[in-house]
Image: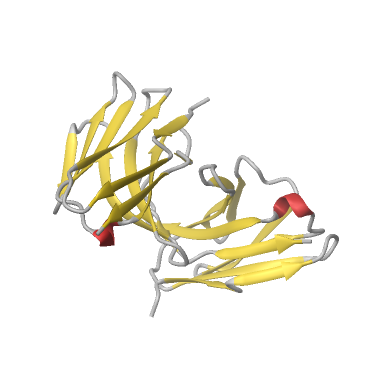
Amino acid sequence: KQEVTQIPAALSVPEGENLVLNCSFTDSAIYNLQWFRQDPGKGLTSLLLIQSSQREQTSGRLNASLDKSSGRSTLYIAASQPGDSATYLCAVWGSNYQLIWGAGTKLIIKP
Amino acid sequence: DADVTQTPRNRITKTGKRIMLECSQTKGHDRMYWYRQDPGLGLQLIYYSFDVKDINKGEISDGYSVSRQAQAKFSLSLESAIPNQTALYFCATSESLRGNTQYFGPGTRLTVL
């Protein structure tokens, strides 16, 4: 059974720092991996989607990498800003039609 | 206007009551999903629907039922609410291809006393 783990559960850093969020999964037979952002009261927003054949995806200050063989993905945030404060979740599509989710990393960027 | 809307946004109910959570979307997507989120846990899939005539159970469907009234509407019912169904509930939609990104509503916070 696929399991997705995100470490750390919470992270607090000063504004301007570069940071890395981690996601690991137990079954490497994934279709793709997605990173989402969750803001209180606003639901979830898709940030990046990496197909299983890809190694990374970039959007603005965000870069997500995927190493399927080791069951790991990282989300790199450059030059962090207070507006980046949110919970970041990763999720994998497996062989069935369901997304399997990690519990998220709560990120706080201090001004 | 939001593409995926959920009503109500907050609901407090008592054990044993029947309640319905509603989801509407204007994205024109065939696929719709209901998830619940508990503190410290990832989202768990309750039900999903590929189209109006195709409804499937997710990993935690016990105690829940759904109705897909139209392409744009997908409702979740708790037939007899219990306290451990207290959670944040999300509706989501996606295009037909497997693996496409999902678009989420703002969530419904449900408390069962």
Quick check: A110 left or right of B35? Answer: left
Quick check: A9 left or right of A13? Answer: right
Above or below: residue A69 compared with residue A87 = above
Which residue is at the far right?
A: B16
Residue beneath the point at 39% across and 53% down: B96
Residue beneath the point at 57% across and 72% down: B9
Residue beneath the point at 47% across and 59% down: B92
Give residue A30's quadrant in the image: top left
Q: Position of residue A15 (x, y in %)?
A: 21, 54
Give residue A43's quadrant in the image: bottom left
Quick check: A97 left or right of A24? Answer: right
Between B27 and A46, the one lying in front of the other is: A46
Which residue is at the far top?
A: A69
For the C terminus of chain A, the image quarter is bottom left
Above or below: residue B92 compared with residue B70 = above
Q: Position of residue B43 (x, y in %)?
A: 52, 46
Residue beneath the point at 22% across and 41% down: A19
Asked whether residue B101 is in view, the answer is: no
Asked whether residue B48 is in view, the answer is: yes
Q: Position of residue B1 (x, y in %)?
A: 38, 80
